[in-house]
Image: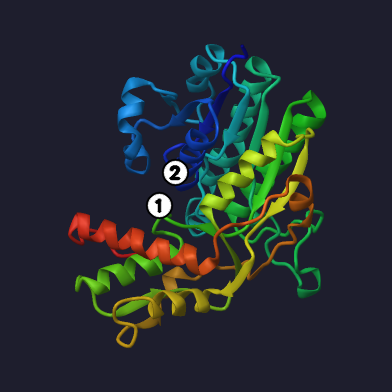
Amino acid sequence: MTNTCKALITGITGMVGSHLLDFLLANSNWDIHGICRWRSPLDNISHHSDRINKQDRITLHFADIRDYMSLQDIFSTNKFDFVFHLAAQSYPHTSFTSPNDTYVTNITGTENILKSIQIHSPKAVVHVCSSSEVFGRVSPEFVPIVEDCRFHPASPYAISKCGTDLIGRYYAEAFGINTQITRMFTHTGPRRGDVFMESSFAKQIALIEQGYIEPSVLVGNLNSLRTIADVRDAVAAYYLAVTIDPAPGSYYNIGGNDSMSVKDVLKFLISISTMPNDISYEIDITRLRPIDADLQIPDVTKFKCKTGWTPLYTAKDTLSDLLDYWRHKVKLNKGQFLQR
């Protein structure tokens, strides 16, 4: 009888981490460990509270990836078969005002995780979550973007993810750690943080529908072109990356099938609201980035050929579920949110 595999998810309380937890519980028999900071809200995994309290396949560890010592008890007492490194400062706009925090979290944090794996779980298969933002400002002739397109980061966040990406490949080449690096393009869905454009739009519309704010959505750059994927498809892709013949140092672009401008995303969300003819929008200059990565369209041939992965959700399905998520949150909290 084989032993049950043990997996670690850093950032387990985030949107992606919580959906990956859902996926692994439903599609594997693995024991799942998660790292979260002591002050991290647990809302996204609260539906697993009973299992967490009973340690029924779920064990939480409180640590900070920026603090190497805080990780040592976790890694020295557990031999992990799989590690999904998702924890990050993930909001590009914030990185312009907090670049140092972004660099330390995303670069030093990744170094701390991979060094801990090298010492304590060197045979683990490791998913390192990079980002499509590493490509930054891409000329139209290089769209759709292939894996070997040159990096041209357009924010401190993107710069930090270049570091994450390169550290992941370095640990494969230098130490033989089986890292799988993914550059996931725009992905969203239920539990998406309200600092991201499509989730901010959905939240504002939900607040408008309940009469908490005026019927005008605050927006930033509406001209950026994005390929939208569903977070539930994203976590299925991450599972395949570590389970289907993973070769150390592999790197993949991953993204959905549907490309839309930010303006198209906004218009669709307004169109499915309960008051589509009454909601307008206005530019909020604080939402504009100093530089924007405005052509984020991936070529995902390499990953699909390797794994057979294909998205199950359309962009419209995803955005509809995102709006329903915010409708539920607004009703539950009686509109007691800061607007974003």
Q: Is residue 221 visible?
A: no
Q: Earlier in the sequence, mark 2 or mark 1?
A: 2
Q: Nearer the viewer, residue 323 or 203?
A: 323
Q: Residues within 10 Å of mark 1 (few under 14, many from 20)?
A: many
Q: Please state which of residues 87 and 255 is positioned toward the viewer in this rendering.
A: 255
Q: Which mark is residue 14?
A: 2
| Residue 245 to residue 287: above or below | above
Mark 1 lies on a secondary structure that is: loop
Quick one: SS at disc 2? loop
Image position, residue 83 (x, y; %): 60, 30
Q: Looking at the image, which residue is at 50% across and 18% down?
A: 74
Residue 166's place in the image compared with 253, above or below, is: above
Q: How many marks?
A: 2
Identified by mark 2, the residue type is Gly
Q: Tag 1: residue type?
A: Arg
Return the x and y of residue 204 as percentages of the image width and height: 32, 69
Crowding at dot 2, Cα within 10 Å, few <14 / some 14-19 / many 20+, comes out as many
Circle 2/circle 1 CB separation < 8 Å: yes
Percent across and percent down for residue 65 are 51, 31
Location of the C terminus by quadrant is: bottom left
Query: Residue 85: which quarter of the image?
Result: top right
Q: Which mark is residue 116?
A: none
Q: Is residue 177 left or right of residue 215?
A: right
- The residue carrying mark 1 is 191
Please say whether residue 49 is visible from this viewpoint: yes
Image position, residue 69 (x, y; %): 51, 19
Mark pair 2, 1: CA separation: 8 Å
